[in-house]
Amino acid sequence: MTVPLRDTLRELGERMPPARLPEDPWRRGRRQRRRSRVVAAVVVALLCAAVAVLPGVHLEPQPSGGDPAVPAGIELPYFFQATVGMAPPGPATVLFGGYSWGLSSDPYPFEEEGGKLAVVGRNGAYRMLRYPDDKLRAGQDVRLSPDGNLVAQSMLTGGPPGWLVVTDLRTGRSRGYGDGPPACCFEVAAWRPDSGAVLVLHGDNNDYDPATDRPRAQYILVDLASGALVPVDDVFPRDPVASAWVAAFAPDGHGFVATRPSAGGTELRGYDAAGRRLWTRDLGDRRLAGSGAYTPDSSAVALLTIDGCTNTKECDHDRLAARRWRVSYVDAATGADREGPALPTVTGPAVRALGWHGDTLVVVQYELEAEVLLEPDDTGWSETRHVRVLALRPDGTVSVVLDPPGDVSSIDIAQDLLRDGRFGGPVPAPAALPARWSVIAQVGSLALCVMSPVLLIAALVIRLVRRRTARP
């Protein structure tokens, strides 16, 4: 470097203003290092929390693996779980309802009126069906088709008009049958075994039978492909608390049976496939076992006999819980009593047959709430605390097919899986995504409301700091 250049640089340096340094640069440096350590610690803590929590939060459905089967267990869905219409789960194994956040009204501030039932797809996906009524029960008010592809119900939030609504779980689309709005007293009675028709019990609370003071009703066979509505037999006063045991179809599709109240208790009528009556039988206190009552060869129909308190007006909680249910049979062709597989009795307030695998009958066993109404519905939403699925075998053994979480109070299972004996499948875990759009929008709005003042304060603090550091 030449002498003139060095002198010039020295003169320029002397003209420059002195560097602005804090009063104690060493203390400020220590504070910056402490802040960096705190930020690093927070980041590490958040990462540790994520590592601990995220393995339990599945973002994708857990594949069941292998052939479809009734899962050995189920889990409770998230309250923000996507609906069937948003992301169809495909054919289902199980349909269930209950009392948890995921199965009842949404928690604050995400409330949406009405109730929910959960569908478990054969791919492990959990999806929700939403209803204006929060007391609908899986396997009674809402029924899963034998092949697991469809769900029949009397109403659906955002669904089409009609007093029967059928939802396709493969596409998420729903179709309405029947004119007018959903019926207040409508019941899905049973599915035809090919999943092509539904037998419904259609009533009207404005049409009462003067002799019994009960609403009148009539069975109607609904063909899903053509939309044809075929009335079955005559109108009768319906039993408002017998929806668990109203009707059943023969597995061969050649006929069905349906019940109605009688002077002595319950009357059972047999019909051919077109709905023409073939025979009538008074059952007394016995009941049709349920929608899965027909034996696999369609030759006999299972009935249930109660050992214990039968008059619900006189039964208290303990007497209802102590009931014992025995299986007997009538001939499917004549209605006459006949022999059948000797099965063990089941204790509980109610039992409902889902279907058969060989000579094994699969049933739902009900458990009571701690308190019940004065005249309880044996399988009512308010009276039922929990359900589980049992297999009754002729050798006298009873095994648990599915014992869901304690908050599950109603359940239905695809009959084709029962018929083929496909039990004990993997337990699918609900995936956090996809979530309902309404919940995502509300979470986004809530996050924006919370973060906006924080971001505003941070911006003001940064501006003040910059002003102070800019002073000479």
Image (cartoon, rainbow, N blue to C red):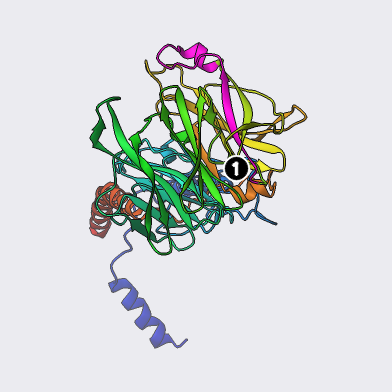
Q: Residue 291 at what x, y percent from top left?
A: 53, 41
Residue 81 visible within the image: no
Left or right, 167 with reference to 400:
left
Q: In which quarter of the image is residue 459?
A: bottom left
Residue 137 inside the magenta-drawn segment: no
Q: Which residue is drawn at 72% across and 43% down?
A: 358
Q: How crowded is mark 1: few (under 14 residues within 10 Å), some or many (20 or more)?
A: some
| Viewer-proximal residue among 105 and 120 | 120
| Viewer-proximal residue among 171 and 276 | 276
Q: Residue 230 at what x, y percent from top left?
A: 38, 53
Q: Residue at x 52, y 45 (%)?
A: 256
Q: Give the range drawn in magenta.
A: 298-321
Question: Which quadrant does the C terminus fall into?
Answer: bottom left
Q: Residue 111 at what x, y percent from top left?
A: 30, 41
Q: Residue 399 at what x, y percent from top left?
A: 70, 32
Q: Which residue is drawn at 53% across and 36% down?
A: 290
The residue indicated by pointer 1 is 333
What kind of element bears circle 1?
A: loop
Residue type, label 1: Ala
Furthest residue to the right?
A: 395
91 shown above or below 422: below
Q: Which residue is drawn at 40% across and 21% down?
A: 376
Total tally of numbered discs in the picture: 1
Residue 3 visible within the image: yes
| Viewer-proximal residue among 395 and 91 | 395
371 shown above or below 95: above
36 shown above or below 214: below
